[in-house]
Image (cartoon, rainbow, N blue to C red):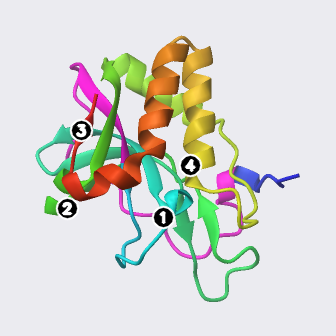
Amino acid sequence: MPVVLPEQGRSGTVGEPPINLDWIAKDPDIDLPVYIIVSGPRDGSSHDLRGLHWRLSWQVARDKWRYVHIVEHWRDHQRAPNPRYVYWGALTQSSGHSTSKLTKVLVGVMSLATRKSIEQLALEVPVMWPDGTWNCQNWILDLLTRMHRAGIISQRRWEEVVGAAHNGQEQLSYGNIVP
C-alpha cells in the first residue's frame, strides 16, 4: 500500500520551490481551454507510456502557462525520500517553443472560478512515497476523479481525456491537440 508523504511532499524538502510568475501573468477572468499536457523525458530517451509526464495546464499569457502537477525534487542533503515527488501548488511559468510541440489533451474550456476550484481540489490530492509504480499520472488521475466528483467534468469526458492522455506517446511526435 502506498505511503502518503506529509504536506504533498513538501515536508523536509531542501531548497526553494520553483519560481512562480503569477505576479507577472495573472490568471485572467475569461474562459480558457484547460489541457492535460503529455511530455516525454527531458533527455529524449526512450520511454514507455508510464514514463510520460502529465500536467494539467492552461495558457494565461503569451509564453506563460499555469501548471497543476507534481514534480520530481532531488537535492543533496535532503532526507529520504530523495528524490521525491512534490506538489508545490499551482505555478505560472514561462514556456518555450517546445510547449507548442507537446501533446495537449483538451479537458474543457473553463471559467476562472472553475480553474480556481481545480487548484483547490489539487491541494487535497495526496503525493505518495516513491515506490517505482506511483507517479505523476496517478496524481493527475486522482485530480481528474475529484474534478468529476465535483461536477467539473462528466464521466464520459473523464474517460475520453484519460484514454487520450494514455495514448499520448503516439501523439508526441505530432504536437497535436486532442479534442
Determine whether 131 is above or below 159 in the image.
below
Q: Earlier in the sequence, mark 4 or mark 2?
A: 2
Q: Which residues are magenta?
A: 8-37
Q: Main secondary structure of the magenta part?
A: loop
Amino acid tagged 4: Gln
Amino acid tagged 1: Pro
Q: CA distance from mark 1 to mark 4?
A: 21 Å
Where is residue 12? Give x, y as percent: 71, 69
- Mark 1 vs mark 4: in front: 4
- Mark 3 vs mark 1: in front: 3
Q: Quadrant of residue 34?
A: top left
Q: Earlier in the sequence, mark 4 or mark 3?
A: 4
Judge left or right: residue 141 versus residue 9.
left
Rendered residue at 62%/57% (across/down): 135
Determine whether 108 is above or below 87 in the image.
above
Q: Are marks 3 and 2 in contact (CB under 8 Å)?
A: no
Q: Which residue is mark 3?
A: 177
Where is residue 19? Give x, y as percent: 36, 62
- Mark 1 vs mark 2: in front: 2
Alpha-carbon neighbours of circle 1 within 10 Å: few (<14), some, or many (≥20)? Answer: some
Amino acid tagged 3: Ile
> Can residue 91 be seen by looking at this rendering?
no
Secondary structure of the residue carrying numbered label 4 = helix
Q: Quadrant of residue 108?
A: top left
Give residue 17's mark. Answer: 1
Amino acid tagged 2: Ser
- Mark 4 vs mark 3: in front: 3
